[in-house]
Structure formats: C-alpha cells, structure tokens
Amino acid sequence: MHPIIATSLRFHQSGDPADAQFVDHAAHAREAFEKLAANPGPVVIDEAAGFLFTVAFLPHGLWTTVAAFLLFRILDILKPPPARQLEKLHGGWGIVLDDVAAGIMGNLLLRAGLALL
C-alpha cells in the first residue's frame, strides 16, 4: 500500500496525530528521495499535520478554526526560528518538522490570544 494512502487510513481510524506523523515522515522521505526534491509540492500531508498541531486541545468553533488556519499558514510561510532551521534537516525530517514547529508556535500564539479575550 502506498504510504500516503496508509497515512490517511491510519489517521482516519485512530484520529491520533502521532499516527499521521509517523507514516507521513516515511511517505515524505520516500517521495523526496525518489524525486530528489526538498519538499514535494503535490504532497501536503505535512501541512495537514502542522495544522492538527495548531488546533490540538483548543476549543472547538468556527472562529478558532479559521484563526488557527490563518495563523498556521502565516507561520508556515514566514518560517520563524526554529522552523527555518528544522526545514534544513535532511530527508523527510526537514519536510515534516518545519510544519510541526509552525503548528506548535501557532497553537501557543492562539492560546495566548484566547487567554487575553
């Protein structure tokens, strides 16, 4: 079974972001190695995993989700430290961990913003 299909099946069954992250790393490492690309454009499971880290354990709601998505995308594009340094790791690690770092930073910033409201 292709790693990307396995990722979506495992995550769909368990709902655990760790499942998606584990198989996601394998899928990206294989894809990057095969295509010799730093970050394969058509593969976006790393962004999905980063977004899951952004919304983890936050209150559910439309505005929280929209704010989390926008904040994650801004951080993913700007790549503030340590995301930029993590992006330079070899293979699938750099492809995945920069998005995870952006997701964690987004989560912390959103928590701070919600605490101020």
Image: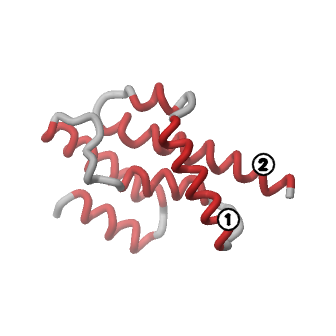
Q: Residue at 70% x, 52% y: name it.
A: 110
Q: How is the image coloured?
A: secondary structure
How far is disc 1 from disc 2 in space, using C-alphas?
12 Å
| Element class at badge 1 | helix
Q: Nearer the viewer, residue 44 or 20?
A: 44
Point out residue 53 in the picture as x, y percentages from the top left corner: 55, 53
CA neighbours of label 1 inside 10 A, class few (<14), some (14 to 19), many (20+): some
Specify the quadrant of the image occupied by residue 35.
top left
The residue labelled by disc 1 is 64
Q: Residue at 64% x, 59% y: name it.
A: 67
Point out residue 17 in the picture as x, y percentages from the top left corner: 48, 59
The disc at residue 75 is none
Left of 103 or right of it: where is 4?
A: left
Specify the quadrant of the image occupied by residue 91.
top left
The residue labelled by disc 2 is 112
Residue at far left of view: 34
Q: Amino acid at mark 2?
A: Ala
Point out residue 76 in the picture as x, y percentages from the top left corner: 49, 43
Tags 1 and 2 in contact by the CB under 8 Å rule?
A: no
| Element class at badge 2 | helix
The quadrant of the rendering that contains the N terminus is: bottom left
Q: Amino acid at mark 1?
A: Thr
